[in-house]
């Protein structure tokens, strides 16, 4: 009976005897095609925005930041302890510190955050070396650019102060003083490089120096190996296909970092442990929410397109009343008759959706590998991003198929209500 229902469904779809029905079949196919295409392409672009911006944030910031409230960390001891406990799960660790300074050059001053990094280990937790634009970034650049009293600065900060590579600046460092005045210590530094991260909060407000130079500036009385932060990057603990399976679950994103954060918080309850998402929670959450909202809106549009099949199937059932009555008289059960029209709708939905997904995938692949559509810097990226992932195609195809099934179920059941005696007697 399944073969019989498929045979009739295909014959009815291929029939051109009734022009109005044939035209409605084309309209339904085109509606599903456009709906699935727009839904898939929008998801590819929104997924591109989320992935690219999160990768930029995650690249500059480490996966996890460890700090101690109102005190410095004994970096060597803490690193040894964490390596002993979780060595197999850690990709890299690096120490760092931060302090506000006043930078002066040619009677122009600006307040910046001076971030200290370890040039030997920073590449394990950050991609800052790849963001250096002047001089052009090369392997080992970060080590040579942060020697002695050298610093690298964001390009917007450099533009506002009028700095170029090789310029000498004066660092004004606050010292402890009485309540009535502020004492500043002067130190000279050389601008050895300029970086461009793509985030205004870094490019306008941050400069980097080595930990040794930072300790000379702020810890002259205490030369111990301490730092304000310990940055950690973790390894994915699950396989590639396990991650893809997790990403198929709605409203869930595979995140090994959060799992490792929970372990560290249990092991080090007296320390403050934060993930990279917690550094920019509003941006990360808004990107996810925007993607899901766009998915729901376009899914509703696809549902409206699927509802065209209700009209199509009612027209088809009405025009095939004689055929249905004859088949019933021959002993075909009602389930098989309903299955004929249900399969008609599913065939249209499946092929229209597959063709729409294929076209969206091709355009998404072109946008991902050959970015040429420029967008304003306000979006944190220079070109329209796209990220094609298999789980997106599976999710959109299943949703479209489900909507098509819902739209065809009601009219398919209509075939059961045809009175055989009435039809054969009068028609």
Image: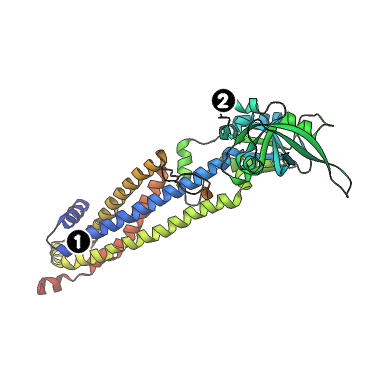
Mark pair 2, 1: CA separation: 63 Å
Q: Which mark is residue 395?
A: none
Colour scheme employed for the rendering of this structure: rainbow
Q: Is residue 298 visible?
A: yes
What residue does disc 1 label? 23
Reading the image, the residue beneath label 2 is 139
Q: Nearer the viewer, residue 303 or 192?
A: 192
| Residue at left offset 55%, top offset 41% | 56
Q: Nearer the viewer, residue 342 or 333?
A: 342
Task: Say which quadrant the N terminus sits in.
Answer: bottom left
* Secondary element at tag 2: loop
- Give the quadrant of residue 107: top right
Q: Is residue 373 left or right of residue 192?
A: left
Considering depth in this image, is 274 or 424 the residue closer to the camera?
274
Q: Is residue 88 above or below residue 66?
A: above
- Which of the pair 66/326 is nearer the observer? 66
Q: Residues within 10 Å of mark 1 (few under 14, many from 20)?
A: few
Picture quarter with the C terminus: bottom left
Q: What residue is drawn where x is 29% and y is 58%?
A: 31
- Residue at image location 63% in from the left, 47% down from the top: 278
- Name which of mark 2 and mark 1 comes first in the sequence: 1
Q: Looking at the picture, how far across and down is residue 126, in whole percent? A: 60, 35
**Circles 2, 1 touching at the beta carbon (< 8 Å):** no
How crowded pointer 2 is (Cα within 10 Å; few <14, some 14-19, many 20+) is rated as few
Task: Nearest to the eye among marks 2 and 1: give it.
Answer: 2
Against 186, residue 43 (above or below) is below
Q: Position of residue 9 (x, y in %)?
A: 20, 56
- Residue 74 appears in the picture as rendered: no
Give the answer, above or below, for where 19 lies relative to 419: above
**Residue 234 position within the rendered picture, expressed as x and y whole percent measured from the top left:** 59, 35
238 to the left or right of 147: left
């Amino acid at each position: 009976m399944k073969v019989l229902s498929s045979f009739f469904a295909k014959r009815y779809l291929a029939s051109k005897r009734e022009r109005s029905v044939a035209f409605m079949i084309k309209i339904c196919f085109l509606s599903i095609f456009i709906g699935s295409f727009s839904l898939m392409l929008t998801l590819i672009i929104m997924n591109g925005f989320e992935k690219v911006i999160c990768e930029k944030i995650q690249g500059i910031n480490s996966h996890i930041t460890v700090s101690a409230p109102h005190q410095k960390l004994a970096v060597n001891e803490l690193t040894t302890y964490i390596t002993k406990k979780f060595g197999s799960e850690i990709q890299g660790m690096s120490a760092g510190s931060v302090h506000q300074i006043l930078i002066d050059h040619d009677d122009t001053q600006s307040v910046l955050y001076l971030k200290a990094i370890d040039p030997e280990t920073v590449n394990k937790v950050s991609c800052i070396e790849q963001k250096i634009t002047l001089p052009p970034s090369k392997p080992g650049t970060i080590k040579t650019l942060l020697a002695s009293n050298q610093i690298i600065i964001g390009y917007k900060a450099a533009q506002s102060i009028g700095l170029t590579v090789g310029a000498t600046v004066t660092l004004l460092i606050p010292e402890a003083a009485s309540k009535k005045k502020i004492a500043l210590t002067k130190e000279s530094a050389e601008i050895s490089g300029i970086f461009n991260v793509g985030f205004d909060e870094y490019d306008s407000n941050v400069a980097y120096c080595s930990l040794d130079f930072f300790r000379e500036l702020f810890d002259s009385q205490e030369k111990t190996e301490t730092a304000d932060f310990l940055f950690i990057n973790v390894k994915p603990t699950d396989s590639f296909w396990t991650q893809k399976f997790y990403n198929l679950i709605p409203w869930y994103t595979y995140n090994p970092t959060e799992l490792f954060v929970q372990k560290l918080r249990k092991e080090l309850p007296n320390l403050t442990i934060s993930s990279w998402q917690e550094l920019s929670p509003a941006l990360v959450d808004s990107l996810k929410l925007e993607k899901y909202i766009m998915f729901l809106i376009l899914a509703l549009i696809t549902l409206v397109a699927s509802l065209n099949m209700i009209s199509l199937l009612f027209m088809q059932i009405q025009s095939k009343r004689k055929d249905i009555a004859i088949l019933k008289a021959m002993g075909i059960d009602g389930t098989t008759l309903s299955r004929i029209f249900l399969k008609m709708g599913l065939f249209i939905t499946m092929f229209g959706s597959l063709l729409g997904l294929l076209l969206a995938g091709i355009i998404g692949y072109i946008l991902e590998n050959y970015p040429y559509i420029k967008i304003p810097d306000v979006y944190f990226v220079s070109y329209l991003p796209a990220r094609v992932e298999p789980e997106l195609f599976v999710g959109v195809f299943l949703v479209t198929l489900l909507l098509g099934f819902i739209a065809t179920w009601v009219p398919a059941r209509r075939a059961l209500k045809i009175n055989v005696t009435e039809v054969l007697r009068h028609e």
